[in-house]
Image (cartoon, rainbow, N blue to C red):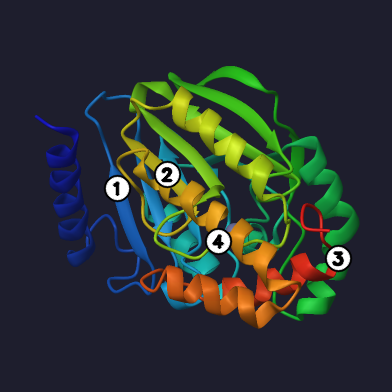
Amino acid sequence: MSHKFKFSIIMAIAVLFFLSTGAFAAAPAKMAGKVFIYDNGNGIARIHTYMAPFKAAANTSHVIELKDKLVLVDMQFVEAFAKEFRAYVDSLGKPVDRIYLSHEHPDHWFGSIAFQDAKVYALEGVIGFVKKIGPAIIKKKGKPAAIPNFAGTVKLGTEKIGGLTFEFSQFQNSESGNALVIALPELKTLIVQDLIYSNCHLYMGHDSFNVWISTLEKLKAQYKDYEWFLGGHGEPATTTAVIDNNIVYLNEANKAFDMAGGDLNKIKEYLFKRFPDLKAQFFVPFSVGIALKKPNQHK
Ligand SMILES: [Zn+2]
């Protein structure tokens, strides 16, 4: 049985559960976000991906459902979606063992307001950044948020949790200063978060496109036989084509920056014309504005 076929069966089962009012009653029958469930039949774990609506940047959070506990990745941005994700997590009826925060950007940890009772782990640089700058970011944005309940740093390398192998690696100065990538070899799943965007424009505020491209080339070579790629924005993808798409985008963004001479509108026009079908267009003016103010690569 192909993994795609198994995936669709699981999706159908999930829909039936949500239509009933039985064991899964804690999850709202009609959600604003979308849930994708992946199970390759290995019997150890399955993965639930909660995605906020595209108009809210399609932020993703994941649940790795083990036999008797849950491991989560990222906590949403907007309070309403964080709460909806929390209700979904609770509907699974298993305790949250821990949460991994993938990187320092607030759209992945503001929603920790709904997860203050859970232990959060992240890379050292991420914890340092969020503890130091986080309170000012919360004040500036003026939205409901909380500093995550950090319990410790992620130890890079391989770890078994609930019988499942987790491989943790770190990539720096790509989409953000620090990024955690989690590979789950038994599930052929790569949790990449914001190093890849799926069917969305990219956040370019870190302005480190060339390093980001080489990070993506490494990931593509290392995980070419994987079947489930989870980015931080947009739907799950089944092949490394999603990585190729991000490389193409970053090469085009390099061209746009080189020809625009610091003119945000020129960069925006170029990228909107080149990628008319990509969603979350607001990422472009927002993040290019940040990159132009604090250039890193395009000085
Ligand atoms: Zn993000």
Question: In the rendered image, which residue does mark 1 sit on?
Answer: 37
* CA distance separating discs 3 and 2: 36 Å
Q: Which mark is residue 202?
A: 4
x and y percentages locating residue 8 in the rendered image: 15, 47
* CA distance separating discs 4 and 1: 24 Å
x and y percentages locating residue 53 in the rendered image: 42, 72
Front residue (pair 31, 179): 179
x and y percentages locating residue 39 in the rendered image: 26, 36
Q: Which mark is residue 244?
A: 2
Q: Are marks 1 and 2 in contact (CB under 8 Å)?
A: no
x and y percentages locating residue 121 in the rendered image: 69, 39
- Label 1: state its secondary structure: strand
- Ligand 1's quadrant is bottom right
* CA distance separating discs 1 and 3: 34 Å
Is the residue marked 1 within 8 Å of ligand 1, measured from its CB? Answer: no
Front label number (2 vs 4)? 2
* CA distance separating discs 3 and 4: 25 Å
Looking at marks 3 and 2 on the same chain, the residue that comes earlier in the sequence is marked by 3
Q: Residue at x 42, y 61 (%)?
A: 51
- Report crowding for label 1: few under 14, some 14 to 19, many 20 or more residues within 10 A (C-alpha): many
Horizontal side of residue 296 vs 67, given as left or right: right
* CA distance separating discs 2 and 4: 13 Å
Is the residue marked 2 within 8 Å of ligand 1, measured from its CB? Answer: no
Q: Residue at x 17, y 40 (%)?
A: 4
- Report crowding for label 2: few under 14, some 14 to 19, many 20 or more residues within 10 A (C-alpha): some
Kind of residue indicated by mark 3 = Pro
Question: In the rendered image, which residue does mark 3 sit on?
Answer: 135
Q: Are marks 3 and 2 in contact (CB under 8 Å)?
A: no
Front label number (1 vs 2)? 2
